[in-house]
Amino acid sequence: MKKTMVLNGQSISLTVLRVTDTEVDVSVASKHGASIAATLRAVNKGYWGVLRINLHDAARIAPDSESFRILQTAIYDLAVGAAHSQERKAA
């Protein structure tokens, strides 16, 4: 799964790299910078809620709290969507 968005005037690409029962890895890249990695972890089966992202790296894309919240939400939505898609395929 992939999603493209504009954040702070930058075109940002979010790409799901890996989906397991407990984790979803997402790559976040801007056109003019190195990509950063984010991992969404399941708290319990079916409950997603722990997002791991390097804040120093994320600050290059989302330097203020509002843009970071938007980025965080986009990562979460894409990762949960990928997890649910895989669950439906497995069922």
Image (cartoon, rainbow, N blue to C red):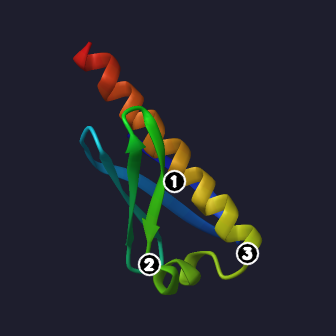
Instruction: Classify 10 Å Cα crowding around label 2: few (below 14), some (14-19), many (20 and above).
Output: few
Q: Is residue 9 visible?
A: no
2 is higher (above) or lower (below) than 86: below
| Circle on res. 65 | 3
Against 54, residue 17 (above or below) is: above
Q: Quadrant of residue 72?
A: bottom right
> Between marks 2 and 1, how big is the CA–CA gap?
13 Å
How many numbered discs? Answer: 3
- Cβ atoms at labels 3 and 1 below 8 Å apart: no
Instruction: Provide the secondary structure element on which disc 2 rests.
Output: loop
What amino acid is found at the position of numbered circle 1 in the picture? Ile
Which residue is tagged 1?
A: 75
| Residue 45, image quadrant | top left
Pinpoint residue 44: horizontal percent, then vertical percent.
39, 40
- Numbered label attached to residue 54: 2
Q: Earlier in the sequence, mark 3 or mark 2?
A: 2
Q: Earlier in the sequence, mark 2 or mark 1?
A: 2
Residue 65 seen by the camera: yes
- Residue 67 drawn at (x, y percent): 70, 69
Disc 3 versus disc 2: distance between alpha carbons? 14 Å
Instruction: Classify 10 Å Cα crowding around label 1: few (below 14), some (14-19), many (20 and above).
Output: many
The secondary structure type at the circle numbered 1 is: helix
Locate residue 16 relative to residue 30 in the image: left or right.
left
44 versus 27 height, above or below: above
Q: From what the image shows, is residue 64 above or below residue 14?
A: below
